Image (cartoon, coloured by chain):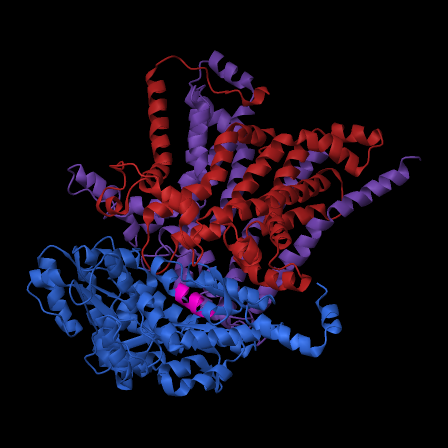
Chain colours: A blue, B purple, C red
Amino acid sequence: MGRSRFHALVPAAVLTMLAGAASAQQRAEVIHWWTSGGESAAVRVFAEQFTKAGGTWVDTAIAGGANARTAAINRTVGGDPPTAMQFNTGKQFDDLVENNLLADVDSVAAAQNWKAILPEAIISAVSRNGKFYAVPVNIHGQNWVWYNKSVLEKVGAAEPKSWDEAIVVLEKIKAAGLIPLAFSGQKNWERDLFNTVMLDKAGPVVWNGIYTQRSEAAARSAEFRAAVETFAKLRNYVDAGSPGRNWNDATALVIQGRAGMQVMGDWAKGEFAAANKMAGKDFGCTLFGSKGGGYVIGGDVFAFPKQKDASRTGAQMLLAKTMLEPETQILFAQKKGSIPVRTDLDTSALDICAQKAAGLMKDKSQQVASVQMLAPPAMNGAMEDVISQFWNGPSTTTDQFIEKVVGVLKQRY
Amino acid sequence: MPGFPRRLTSRAAAGLALLPALTILLVAHLGSTSWTIWISLTSSRMLPNSNFVGLRQYETLLNNDRWLVSAQNLAVFGTLMVVGSLLVGLLLAIAIDQRLRVENTLRSIFLYPFSMSFVVTGLAWQWMLNPTHGIQKLVRGWGFETFQFDWIVRQETVIYTLVFAGIWHAAGLVMAIMLAGLRGIDEEIWKASRVDGIPAWRTYVSIVIPMLGASFATAGILLSASVVRLYDLAVAMTNGGPGLASEVPAKFVMDHLFERGNLGLAAAAATSMLVTVVSIAAPLLYARSRARTAETRR
Amino acid sequence: MNVIEPTGPRPKRTSPARVGLYAFLAISALFFLAPLYVMVVTSLKTMDEIRGGYILSLPSELTFAAWTKAWSSACTGLNCNGIRVGFFNSVRILVPSVIVSIAVGSLTGYALSFWRVRGADLIFGALMVVAFIPYQIFIYPLVRIFSMAGINQTLFGIVIIHTIFGLPTMTLLFRNYFASLPPELFKAARVDGAGFLQIFRSIMLPMAIPMIVVAVILQVTGIWNDFILGLVFAGRENLPMTVQLNNIVNSTQGERAYNVDMAATMLTALVPLVVYFGSGRWFVRGIAAGAVKG
C-alpha cells in the first residue's frame, strides 16, 4: 500500500539507511512439525537465537510431517511461500529444486565452510547439482536399541551386541513373563525395525545395494535372506497390543519395566528424560552393526522457497546462518535428543548416548545414510507396504517377501 | 400478451441463478477432474509435470498389492456398513417411534456421533478395541481370564471394527431419516391393521417398510457417498493396519498425493475411483431421474 | 405440525414386548454413549492413572486441569495459548461459509426444480456424481486456480471452498424439497405475475425453513470438523480450531498427554454437539418436511 510512491519520493541514501534498520527486524515465517513438548523446546532455541541475531521468528507449527509439508508445498506452489520449511534430510524436496522453487544457500555455506564441517552423507543430502539447497540442522540416529537396565539385570542378561545375541536376551525376558520387545506397529516403525535388523545381518553393502542401487542381486543375497528370517522371528517377542500403538507408548513400556527393549530413533530419549530416567543408569542404548557400519543417520533440514519480495531473502540467509552457529547447534541438540550436524564441536555437554553417536560420526565407515536420504518417498512408501504386509501376515513366506521387494526395486518412481 | 416479457426475464433470471453452480461445476469440479485425468497419464512425482507416459501409472496401480487390497476392503466395508447402518437406523427409528416419553433424549444420543469427526472419536474407539487396555482387559479384569476381543489387531477381522465404528457414526442419521419417513405414514394404515388384528411386526414388514422407499434411497445415497470417501475413520482408528488390512482407496490417493510424492499414481487411483463411481451411479441416477420426470409429467 | 407425532402402534402398558423394546433401546444407548464416556472420563484423569488403569473406570480424583490446559495453555509449536486461538478463526470461517453455501445451494435447488431450464437434469446429475468424488483430488488443482485468482490463503477463499464442496448436498436437499411442494403454488404465483426472485423470496424460502434448519445443521458440522481444507486454503491467520486440535493430538514425536488430547477433542466438538443436542427435534422435522419425499 503506497510503498512504490514512498520509494519514489525518498532519496536513495535514506533508503539504504532504512534498509539497514529494517534488516534489524528481519521477519521469518517458519513452517515445521515440531509440536510436542521436547520438540517445542528445541524450536524455541532456534527462535531465540534468531531473535538475538536480529530477526523476528514467526512460528507456524503443524503436527504431522505430511500435514506440514502439504501446507508448505501448497503455499509455495500457490505463490505465497513461507520463509523456511522443514523437511527430513533426504529427497523430499527434489521436485521443488527441479521446479526452480527453492533458493540456494551457497553464500552461507561458503561463509561457514560447510564442506569442511559437515559429514559427507549430509552434504550430498542437501546439495543438488553442486549447490546447497537446504540447511541441515541435526542428525538423528534411527536404529538405536534402548533397553531397561533393571529388566536385563533381573533376567541375568548383559547388553547384547547383535541381533543374534538380542534374540537370546528377548527369549529370557519372555520367560520372565514380561514383554520382550516393546513395539509400535505402525508402517514406518515396522520398516525401521526391519532396516535395523537388515543393517546388522546384511551390512552396509546390501543396505546400499537395496536403497541406492536398487539391485535385485542384493535382495536375492544370502545376507538379505538371513535378515528377513531374523526379522520374522521377532514377531514372537512383541505383545498383542502392538499393532497401531504409538511409539512413545512403546517407550513407556520400557520405562515402566513392563518391557525389555525397544528399537527407535534417538528422539526416544525425550521420553526417558520426561520420566526422569538417566542414560547409562536407568536405561542403556546400543547399536548393532555386526558387518561393520551400524549407525543409520537421518535428520531434519530447512529449505528456503524463492521469494517474490527480495528483502525476504536476507531473512532466509540470516536464519540459515543462525541455525548452524555452534552455540545454536549444541543447545538445539540437547533439547531435541539429536546430535549436532557439525563435526567440529565439543560434545561433552551431551548425554552418553549422544556422545557415543558423535564418536561414530567421526568415522565415515561406521555410518550409513537413512532410507530417506537414499530413496525417493514413493519407493520408501512402497517398501513400507511390503514390509508391513510381511510383518503382519505370518503366512507370507520369506521367498514371497523377497519377490515383493524385488518388485518394489524394479518399479519406476 | 402483457406477461410475456416478464416471463422471459424470469426465465433468464433462473438461468442466471444457476450461474454460480455452473461455474463451480465447470471450473472447480470439471476442471479439477480433467486435470487429474491428465496427470494420471504423466510421470508426475511430488509436483505435476507434463511428461506423457501413457497408461504406465495404471499398470503400476493394477500390480500394486495395496491398491487391490484397498479396493477389496472398501467393497467389504461398504456393503456391511451401508446395510448395517440402514438396519440399525431403521430398528432405532421404529423403536423410538413407539410413543416413548424419553424420545428426545434418545434421539440426541443416537444422533450425536454424526456431529463429531472421526479425527476426534477414532482414538476413543481405538482404545476401547485395543486388547491390552480396552474391553478385553476390562472383561478379563472381571474374572473371565480367557475372554478374547482382539479384532482390531488381527488382519482378518480389523475391517469389521471399522464397520462397527462406521455404523456407530452414521446410524443416527439414518434413524432421523427413517423416523421422518415413519412420521409421514398415514395413521389410517395403523388403524386399519389394528382393526384387522394384524400384529404390529407384520404391519411393519409387509406394509410400512415397503412405503419407506424414499427414505431408504436418501439414506443410501448419503451413506454410499461417505463410504467412497472413507478416509478419516481408517486413519484415526488403525491407520490402515495391521499390515494393509484396513487400507482404503481414498487413503491410497491421499498418501501418494502428499507423503509419498507420487502425484501420477495418486491421480491414476483417483481416476479409477471416479470411473467406478460414475459407472455405478450414473445409470442409477438416470433411472431415478427418468422415473421422477415421468411422475411429475403424470 | 402433527407430522412429528409418533405414528407407531398404540402401546399396551408393560407387555413383554414393551420390556424388550426398552432393553433394546437401553443397550443401544449404552453402545452409542460408550466412546463419549471414555473420552469424558479420560479427560478427567491424571496421566498416571491413565497409564495404569482401566479406560472405563471412573477417575479416582476429579481434575479439570486437562481441560484448562487444553483450552488456554496447551502448546502448538511456540504458541502456548491452547485451542482457544483457533476457536474464533473457526467461527469466522463458519458463519460466512454456512450462509453462502446455503444461499447458493437453495437458489440452485429452486432454479432446478420449478424452472424448466435447459440442461437442468444434466446439471443435477453432474452434481450428484460429484458428491461421490473424494475431495482430496481437488486440492492441488484448486490451489492453482485460487492462486491465479488471487484468493488463495484468504478467508474469502476458504468460504468459496466450503461452498464448492457443500454444493452437491445442499442442492440435493433443496431441490428435493421444492420438488415435493405442490406445483399449483408456483403456478398461482406466476399467474399473479411474480418473477423468479420474488417467488423465491416471498414464497419458497419461508416455506423451506425446516429444510434450512437441516442444511444449517449439516453444514455447521461439516465445516466445523473440516481440517485439511482449512489447513490448505484458509491461510496462516485463519487456521481453524481443528488444526490446533491436530497439533495437540497428533504430534508425531514426543510425549502425548491423553487427558489433554481428550479434553481438547471435547472442546473442539462442543459447537456441533450443542447444535445437535439443541436441535435434534428440528432435524427430524426438517427431514420429514421434504428430504425423504420424491
As for residue A44 lying within the magenta part, the answer is yes
Residue A279 appears left or right of B223? left
Q: Residue at x 40, y 50 (%)?
A: C74
Give the residues drawn in magenta, as a range.
A43-50
| Vertical relation: C60 (above or below) A358 | above
Residue C293 in picture, x, y percent from top left: 60, 32
Q: Nearer the viewer, residue A237 or A66?
A: A66
Q: Identify the image quadrant of residue B10.
A: top right
Q: Residue at x 6, y 64 (%)?
A: A156
Which SS does the magenta portion mostly show? Answer: helix
Residue B120 seen anywhere in this rendered image of the structure = no
* Percent coordinates x, y for residue C146 in the rendering: 64, 60
Residue B146 x/y as whole percent:
16, 43
If the image is split into quadrants, where does the N terminus of chain B sit?
A: top right
Q: Is residue C254 magenta?
A: no
- Residue at left offset 29%, top offset 41%: C45
